[in-house]
Image: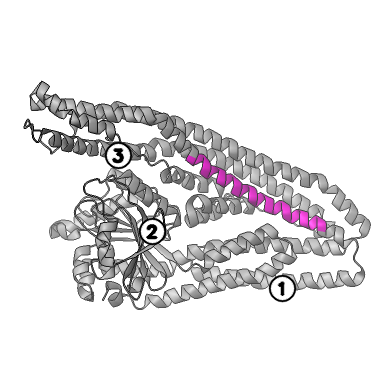
Amino acid sequence: MTITDGVLAEPTDSLQLTRQQRDRAAGLIARFLPLGERLEMTTRLVNLRLAADRVRDETFSVLVMGEFNRGKSTLINALLGRKVLPTFATETTATICEVHYGDTPRARLFPFEGGPIETNVDDLERFVAVDENDPSKPSPYQKVEVYWPVHLCRNGVVLVDSPGLNKSLSHEERTVNYLRSVDAIVFVADSQNAWSRSEVGFVRQIPPGIDPFFVFNKINLVDEEDRDRLRRSVTRRLAEIQPTGVRRHYFVDAKRALAAAGHDTEVDRSGVGEFVRDLQRFLATDRAAVKIGAPARELAEAVREARKQIPVRRGQLAMPLQEAEERVDAQRRPLAELVERRAAIVRRIDEACDDLVRDVRRGMRQFLADTAAKVPEWARLADVSVKLSVNPFTADEVAKEFMAELGEKIEERIAEAYLEWREGRLTVLMHRHADDLGEDLEEDLAAFESRLEGVRSGLMPDHMRVAGSHRDQDGTPLARAMAAAGGMLLAGPGGAFVGARLGPTQMLRSAIPQVAAGVGILMFTPLGLAGAAIAMAAIGVIKVFGGMQMVGDKLRTAVANEFAQNITAGAADRAEKLGDEVAAEMKKFGATIDQGLAVRIEELQNQLAALRENRNRDRAEMERGMAELDAMETQLDALDEGIANLLAGLGPAVPAPRRG
């Protein structure tokens, strides 16, 4: 029996309600599609069909992340009611592990090459654990799926156990790259040692729109008389780090909860019971609002655009032949200017991308140069537990062990320095570029939308013209729609949420730093063949210099030089690669904006084509056309009402769309 079987029966009804909300959202999109087809909103329909696919996806991914030895796997095992995932006091998980619901326990391995491999759950340890003899050795598996009869996962919830964040940069890369696709995050820290510098850095990388669960494990190791003071201290620090405020934080004893599986009282005493109940309520309500809310807002935007087309087409049907011809001719040049404006906006994004990439590369080269200069001091001060020996039979192996441990210490210092640079200078740099690009985009998109409305009004009779786009402090509807689309690409649903509510500048400010967080994870492996050669020379060093202090100094110098040379030699390539990866993400962003602007231009082109066709219609056809437009307007009214009701049911976290 798992913990969630005992304490979580009622929230399942909420998950069923969420499924009904997904069905309602998909149904609303399906009702709009034929209307969009009749109005020839071709590109918009492609996006809505993709949105419908997102709505139908019932999966809720819950990423459990944190530094090594914080109890992530133990916490998941407590939810499973048995030790399923391996747990040790040293670094353990090297591979992403997904826990799905399954009536029968089983596991599937997904190698980087080849198809999935079925295996027994009891054999997981040898597949997902870190190789003790070579901790830096990459895992051959990109992920592992575990199927287990756990109540929490019955309704599509997937628990994701991630590698520790501060021991291996390759393991960190897997976790950070996973961030964009998750629906919820559980950040596990140690109650006795919360908020290291690296932990603060990782919390600040969490995508916008996601309000994490913070689980402070091992509270049982804190003296009872000190626990209240510690809770206040940790919570106060959390309030400083987390911009959304302190809402979901728990102090737990995961081992106690695992041992007490099936005994509700003991589970509650461990603190895990409250955490799990809140997690499932969140998955059934708040997080569903973000997941369903983004496609619902996209549908609302499509309905708004369709509603604008109806009076245009109505006026065009009733327009005298000569007037229709004059209006078509009058809008040819403004429409061509819109195409030119679209190209200019994309060029501005490309130029901003080039500037950003140039500065990122320059900053990376400077960081690597500074790091190479610091390595000798780090090597000199490193506390190495291995003691060197003059015994000729063991000196070689001892020297290797000494250098391996020293190498790990230096790698840890490099990782800390990289995180500090990434969260400090790199973030400041990228925020500056985000602000500049965001402000320019808001102005450009406002001008584009104003011209767009001008062309649309020019196709209508004078008495039916509508007012231009409303612009508030967060930009025009077009700017927010573009920001939502770009935010989805750069930072997932959270980025889309920020873009839809706050516009391009705030979306870019929150999302662009994640581009660098998800790429550019450094890999330093200097103790390869050259390091082995140095180790083989250790006996010679010992024979020549004799004294252990001098031998140790020489070995430290040799290792430091190897690291520094590796960093310096690869600086240009690493900077180039980071720039290339940032550029690739930003180019995708530019393509997304370009596509969004193309949708608007295409809709106008379709209206021009329809106006040309109307010149050849007789009175009976005109009346049928008017009746069809009346029916479409009634259907749009019903869709608006359905969208408003859907979003109201999702809660206040989702802003209501603007009509008209």
Does the segment drawn in magenta span residue 46? no
Circle 1 sits on which residue?
Answer: 634
Q: Which residue is situated farthest in the top direction here?
A: 544
Label 1 vs 2, first from the N-terminus: 2
Q: Is residue 335 visible?
A: yes
Does the segment drawn in magenta span residue 592? yes
Q: What element carries label 1?
A: helix
Q: For the N terminus, which image quadrant?
A: bottom left
Q: Is residue 655 visible?
A: no
Q: Which tag is nearer the camera, tag 1 or tag 2?
A: 2
Q: Residue 416 carries which label?
A: 3
Relative to 556, does residue 615 appear above or below in the rendering?
A: below
Q: For the C terminus, which image quadrant?
A: bottom right
Task: Where is residue 102? Give x, y as percent.
Answer: 36, 73
- Marks 3 and 1 sit apart, C-alpha to C-alpha, by 60 Å
- Marks 3 and 2 sit apart, C-alpha to C-alpha, by 31 Å
Q: In this view, does 328 lie to the left or right of 650?
A: right
Q: What segment carries the magenta color?
A: 581-609
Label 3 vs 2, first from the N-terminus: 2
Q: Which tag is nearer the camera, tag 3 or tag 2?
A: 2
Callout 1–callout 2 Cβ contact below 8 Å? no
Circle 2 sits on which residue?
Answer: 110
Residue drawn at the location 20% of the way across and 58% of the way down: 218
Are there few (<14), some (14-19), or many (20+) residues within 10 Å of tag 3?
A: some
Are there few (<14), some (14-19), or many (20+) residues within 10 Å of tag 2?
A: some
Colouring of the image:
one colour
Are there few (<14), some (14-19), or many (20+) residues within 10 Å of tag 1?
A: few
Callout 2 amino acid: Phe
Q: What element carries label 2?
A: strand
Callout 1 amino acid: Thr
- Marks 1 and 2 sit apart, C-alpha to C-alpha, by 51 Å
Q: Which mark is residue 44?
A: none
